[in-house]
Image (spheres, helix red, strand yellow):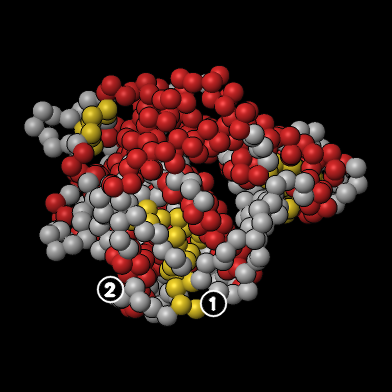
Amino acid sequence: MLSFFRQRGLTNVLYGAIILATILTFVIEFRPNASQRTASLNESCVARVRGRCIDPKDFGAAYRILMPSRSAEASRRLNVKRVALDGLIERELLDDEARRLGISVSDDEVTDQLYSGFVRVSVPAADPGVAQSIFQEMYQAYVRAGLVSQEVAQAHFNERDTAIPVDFRDPKTKKFSMKVYERVVRNLSNRSTTEFREQQARELLAAKMRDVIREPIRVSGNEAWHAYNQSRSQATVEYVTVKESWAARWAVDAKPAELAAWVKENQAAFDGTLESRQKEDAPKAGHIRHILVKLPYGAGDDEKAAAIAKLSWAASRVKAGEAFAEVARDVSDDTQSAAQGGDVGEKTDAFVGPFKSAADALRPGETTAQAIETQFGYHLIEKDDPARAADVAAEVARGLPRSMFAKEKATEAAKRLAKSVATAMRSGKTADDAVRDTIAPYAATGPVALLRVVAAPASDADAGANRSHAQPEVSSAPAAKRFDSTTDTDRPKVQISNAFNSGGDPFPGLSPEATASVVTFAFAAQVGDVMDDPVRDADGFVVVALKERKTVTREDFDKDRDLVEQDLTRAKRDEAMALYVKGLREKAKDSIKIDESYVREIRVDGGAESDDDEEDQN
């Protein structure tokens, strides 16, 4: 049975007698059919599977093997209790399948496994990544406890071997020791050697069934090449997004007569929106509204200048008679409050220092004369005045036709402009020139009065202080003289994607369908080609051109072939195993009953019981 017994010599015979006694102890403690028991009515069960009981000791042993450090934080983070129980349920179902197929485990096979220094524990097949995370943590704990060497643990982890190496040898003789075995089993599983052997027999039977499912799966050379080509070949695209928000602002031209005709054609929708908008934007006593133009972290002078110009343009619109709320919806980068017309409520205690000071200093109906700088960017702030309710309602009524019309026409305008950029690129223009020439004809504002800036405090502590509004004003960085279609931060810009493979995402904001169309184009087109039609994204249309593609060769594949085939085979086997177990669980779902109290992870706080206490209860 063991190669050890095939050696010759008197010393070997003596050692053989000792080990034979050990094996007999193993065998006496275990009978192959002992695991096929049915729960009694009085048993405490963590779960029942087809009437059989998974008792707390079995569950506790599986948990302790997977989490030998007994770290409550790691257990909760990795959800080890749930994983341990799901693994036991899966083991029971696989054991049933094995017996149905006539597969069994002999005494010798269990002895060979334990004598060789391996134990097994089931983890659910549904998510191999979760199992890997738990095994990584488990092996680290085993190495720290001296149960396995770093080299052996790493080798088994890399190979994803489900048999876990545990050193049952005497430190001096480097041979299997029954005393070491008994001590390690007790510490590792909190079970007797008889109970542990029985558990390992059931685990080994489940492992055999897993092999039956996984082993027949193979990967052909062509399949491996296709997967390698898909994963290693990469493409980069150049893209231009024409946003609907930009198109609505600059590329939708509506004369008064045209707006009046549109309102008449859409009278019911317009009246309904007007009624709700006037109610929503009606000034409320003490409420604060703001328009935010964000600054990126570490913004330079040019970015600050552009932000000041944009906020100054928003201020000029308010001054010209547009409703503050409507301008906030169009301009503010605080999307949550922008949807409410810039309304942030009446309580200012939670606001950062400069914002709070400026808001508290306003009288009803006033708007800040300066741009208020905070760590978020630049703000224009207004305090509602209920006495202006009629004026605000009139402002809403004046501005709403243009706003609704522009929103309806923005999609068409953005698509038209995107097609114009694409046509220019196909004609030989660079993407930058195509964008510049396409947007140049659209309306530009004249110079606006630039807001001065109330500086943000230098420290976070100052930012939280309730300072007076009377702060020194400082000039902004050199600011643009105008804010128009060519300086708007929402304007079409040329961007370069990161390199992506056939399973990757070229750039954010695309639907799955649009992503698939861009990827297909990128791996079929020639460098410099432009997609036939712009693709839709969350806020407009995107022109896409292939900038670069790097493809792998058969020579590259031949160098990595063994590793590729190994990884692909493992992935396919994992998938097959997960599907098989999913089917088993679906068929048995009515016969699986779980006591959820056992898989509740303990809290790491003053009211939690200790990990060791909880383990002893198991």
Amino acid type at mark 2: Asn
The residue under label 2 is: 466
Q: Observer-nearest residue: 80 or 273?
A: 273
Instruction: Give whichever of 249, 613 is nearer the camera.
Output: 249
Q: Position of residue 311 (x, y in %)?
A: 53, 59
How many labels, in total?
2
- Whether residue 447 is visible here, answered yes or no, is yes
Classify mark 2: residues with Cα within 10 Å, few (<14), some (14-19) or many (20+): some
Using the image, tell me which numbered label, if any, was put on residue 70: none
Indicate the quadrant where residue 45 lies: top left
Q: Position of residue 7 (x, y in %)?
A: 51, 59
Left or right: residue 443 versus residue 70 is right
> Farthest residue in the left direction?
42
Q: Is residue 470 left or right of residue 610?
A: right
In depth, the one of 249 and 88 nearer the eye is 249
Q: In this figure, which residue is indicated by the disc labeled 1?
A: 475
Between disc 1 and disc 2, whose residue precedes?
A: 2
**Lateral position of residue 362 relative to residue 569, left or right:** left
Look at discs 1 and 2 and give the one toward the viewer: 1
Residue at the (49%, 21%) spot, across then down: 267
| Residue drawn where x is 31% and y is 73% of the image | 464
Q: Amino acid at mark 1?
A: Ser
Query: Is 320 on the left or on the right of 515, as rendered?
Result: left
Point 12% across, 35% down: residue? 43
Q: Is residue 112 visible?
A: no
> 87 and 596: which one is in front?
596
Q: Position of residue 481 (x, y in %)?
A: 66, 65
Q: CA distance from mark 1 to mark 2?
A: 23 Å
Vertically, is 516 above or below 24? above
| Label 2: which secondary element | loop
Residue 97: x and y in percent read: 40, 26
Crowd class of label 1 (few under 14; some 14 to 19; many from 20; radius 10 Å) = few
